[in-house]
Image (cartoon, coloured by chain):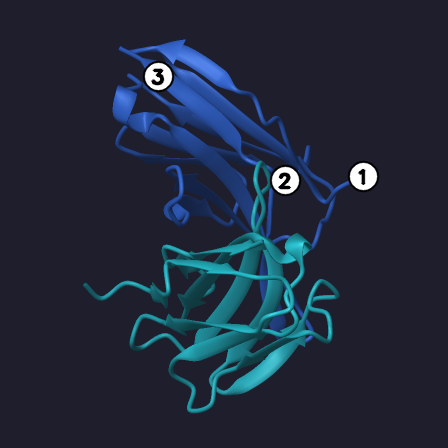
Amino acid sequence: DTGVSQNPRHKITKRGQNVTFRCDPISEHNRLYWYRQTLGQGPEFLTYFQNEAQLEKSRLLSDRFSAERPKGSFSTLEIQRTEQGDSAMYLCASSTTGLQYFGPGTRLTVT
Amino acid sequence: QKEVEQDPGPLSVPEGAIVSLNCTYSNSAFQYFMWYRQYSRKGPELLMYTYSSGNKEDGRFTAQVDKSSKYISLFIRDSQPSDSATYLCAMSVFQGGSEKLVFGKGTKLTVNP
């Protein structure tokens, strides 16, 4: 399968813990995006990488959130000191042409 | 006013019906217009895309864009139970070397056998 992959698929954590998600984009795609989707809503943009450079961060991305793409391949999204409001589906997408292809998402539940 | 408005439904139709899904938008800077299909607890799947006004057809699906009215539509002909999903409209904006998609809320469609 050469699509976008994300791990883990589901994460349950206690409030205050740190969590990290991984995204592996389609191999030749140099652009990588993170989105967050809550129940009944469309995905909301979080951040954008072109190769290893993080070119845009949404205001939704508070100081507790950090994303990296160290070698321009896979990316990680870390949330520190999780809060119940962080419970959502975290989606990763990649592209070369502007058409974004999404992974299956990581569903985060903060208890 | 949100940049992209989409009626969340839900929409329930009998098998074989023609389905019409719509979005309106306010940002003239949007360049690409896309429709994604999302099954429950899965990631969005790109269905159709276009960047100009007019119609684009792919099998049972037709995407329509009217830039003058800031209105896009997706038509599904001969709908099937397997079409039951949430349909998301999305629009891309390129600004200052960056790009992102802005999504509607999604319309939940159920096609009844």
- Residue at (22%, 66%) from the top-left corner? A2
Left or right: A103 with respect to B73?
left
Earlier sequence position, callout 1 versus callout 2: 1
Q: Dot 3: few (<14), some (14–19), or many (≥20) neighbours within 10 Å?
A: some
Q: Disc 3 vs disc 1: Cβ atoms closer than 8 Å?
A: no
Letter of the chain shown cyan in the rendering: A
Q: Is residue A10 above or below residue B53?
A: below
Q: Is residue A61 visible?
A: yes
> Mark 3 and mark 2: span between their CA atoms?
30 Å
Chain letter belonging to callout 1 = B
Local SS, label 3: strand
The one nearer the camera, B24 or B112, is B112
- Residue at (62%, 26%) from the top-left corner? B7
Q: Is residue B93 visible?
A: no
Mark 3 or mark 2, whichever is nearer to me: 3
Mark 1 on the same chain as mark 2: yes
Res A9 quadrant in image: bottom left
- Residue at (73%, 48%) from the top-left corner? B27
The residue that disc 3 covers is B111
Residue B95 on image: x %, y %: 68, 68
Residue B36 on image: x %, y %: 43, 43
Chain letter belonging to callout 2 = B
Q: Residue furthest left?
A: A1
The one nearer the camera, A98 or B50, is A98
Query: Which amino acid type is shown beneath numbered disc 1?
Result: Gln
Q: Is residue A35 above or below residue B65?
A: below
Letter of the chain shown blue in the rendering: B
Q: Disc 3 vs disc 2: Cβ atoms closer than 8 Å?
A: no
Earlier sequence position, callout 3 versus callout 2: 2
The residue that disc 1 covers is B1
Mark 3 or mark 1, whichever is nearer to me: 3
The one nearer the camera, A79 or A27, is A79
